[in-house]
Image: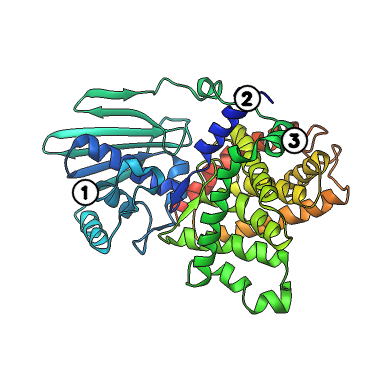
Amino acid sequence: MEEHERQQIIALVKREVVPAIGCTEPMAVALCVARATETLGKRPEKITALLSANILKNAMGVGIPGTGMIGLPIAIALGALIGKSDYQLEVLKDCTLQAVEAGKAFIDEKRIRIALKEGIEEKLYIEVTCEAGGDTATAIIAGGHTDFRRIVRNGEVLLDKMSATTAEEDDNAPQLTLRRVYDFALTAPLDEIRFILETARLNKAAAERSFTGDYGHGLGKMLRGNYEHKIMGDSVFSHILSYTSGACDARMAGAMIPVMSNSGSGNQGISATLPVVVFAEENGKTEEELIRALMLSHLTVIYIKQSLGRLSALCGCVVAATGSSCGITWLMGGGYKEVSYAVQNMIANLTGMICDGAKPSCALKVTTGVSTAVLSAIMAMEGRTVTSVEGIIDEDVDQSIRNLTKIGSRGMNETDRLVLDIMTHK
């Protein structure tokens, strides 16, 4: 692989694997509010947030870090009161108890309006308008959780990238295949990809934090208790499940602790990281092996998400667990053939799992995903793979990936609408 191609891929990973505090959808809304407030130059008297259905779906039932509260209103209020857009997806990390009380008062004063943005196809779209003293400022995020497309103050356009299409932006991204992902992860100079170890540090800390508290449904903590010994066994497998679900427990409940996200999702970052980390540590793998396995996992997720899109009707754990299955397969001694087998097995098994928003029970789906990741790796190492005469699997693994993402991005659109309708009419 040529130097410039390698640097392109490294830059892509560094863009897509970033720290985030709290669920990325409400944090992206808070980020947009913070930027609109900064553009306004004063405390808003009124805030209007127009959101795509997928943003709304993923922000309705999740804890907001440091607040003890759920949902968008407190995220929006704090984005205006203490948010700093320079912090990106850690926009609310300066949150205090006093700020939360001020945020509650802001909500009680009926200063916030939240509605669906009509007439858009973009699944990740946030439009925030702040008003005060006759002045207005609008900020729009679209396409990516931190991708500002338009900034306007009192009719003056300060930034306008609305005409930029996803296709145009993708022209600048490296063209990946599973083979290129595999070759890059195994051959890139170690010092150039060592940064991926930060995913292990952050996400493992989030899991260990969950074991000492009571977050969400407490699945990770539960699995480390009596059930680990009496039912599941004190094994690498049970530790993979407890660490991964534990980090998700803490994050979805709103713990004020950063995780390393992947492609705009903290749960995807957790699921791509912790199964690989636990397997490597408990099997005595070297630091280099851990670095390369983590890079293989995270870059596989990025590759699949390129055609799936940031938000879809398909649960992100399907994609993230596919990445970790690749990493585990390689750590087991598998080569490219076995890694591709693992991907085929994952696609044959988990395709169709719906996303019904970000919430504490995401820990259950994450655990399902990573348990399947281990199963798929074991099958791959035994030379077993789902074949092209079965379902949506193609002989070409990259075509199987495209089949998966076509179902998630196009085929499940009506599912997405129905899920949102059910959620908003309970």
Q: Determine the residue positioned at 24% across, 40% down.
A: 37
> Depth check: 334 or 218 in front?
334
Distance of label 1 from label 2 (alpha carbons): 52 Å
Distance of label 1 from label 3 (alpha carbons): 48 Å
Closer to the eye: label 1 or 3: 3
Residue 310 in view, yes or no: no
109 lies left or right of 379: left
- Badge 2 marks a residue whose secondary structure is helix
Coordinates of residue 401 in the picture (x, y in percent)? 71, 36
Coordinates of residue 34 in the picture (x, y in percent)? 29, 42
118 lies left or right of 350: left
Closer to the eye: label 2 or 3: 2
Return the residue at label 1. 111
Return the residue at label 3. 400
Return the residue at label 2. 3
- Amino acid type, mark 3: Ser
- Amino acid type, mark 1: Arg
